Amino acid sequence: MGHAVHLFGDIEEARLWLKTPQRGLHGAVPLDYAKTDLGVREVESLLTQLGAQRAD
């Protein structure tokens, strides 16, 4: 959650993103996807990619 809050700058925006299906996760909801270690890494990777896109 910390990575999402840092990226979105607001806990409510982070929660909304974490509960919304994401194309980068093949339409999966990040909170559901992150129930495994691999899923957590995939969600973190997507957040990192989004952060890099915002920085451009």
Image: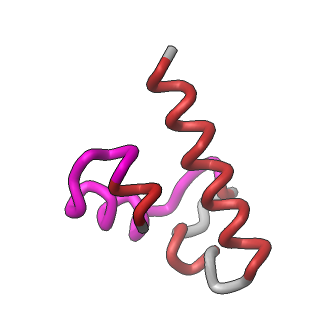
**Position in image of residue 19 (x %, y %):** 40, 70
Look at the picture and state if 20 lies above or below 49: below
Look at the picture and state if 34 lies above or below 4: below
Indicate whether residue 21 is drawn in magenta: yes
Q: Total number of numbered labels? A: 0
**Position in image of residue 28 (x %, y %):** 60, 67
Q: Residue at x 62, y 49 (%)?
A: 46
Question: What main secondary structure does the magenta stretch of the protein show?
Answer: helix
Look at the picture and state if 15 lies above or below 3: below
Q: Residue at x 38, y 58 (%)?
A: 17
Tell me where residue 18 sits by quadrant. bottom left
In the picture provided, is 35 more to the left or to the right than 13? right
Give the residues drawn in magenta, as a range.
Answer: 6-24
**Position in image of residue 1 (x %, y %):** 42, 68
User: Most extreme residue toward the bottom, as rendered?
Assistant: 35
**Position in image of residue 41 (x %, y %):** 72, 64
Indicate whether residue 39 is drawn in magenta: no
Toward the viewer: 47 or 23? Answer: 47
Q: Residue at x 62, y 57 (%)?
A: 44
User: Most extreme residue toward the top, as rendered?
Assistant: 56
Describe the colour scheme in one phrase.
secondary structure
Q: Residue at x 54, y 25 (%)?
A: 53
In the picture provided, is 41 more to the left or to the right than 21? right
Look at the picture and state if 7 lies above or below 52: below
User: Most extreme residue toward the right, as rendered?
Assistant: 38
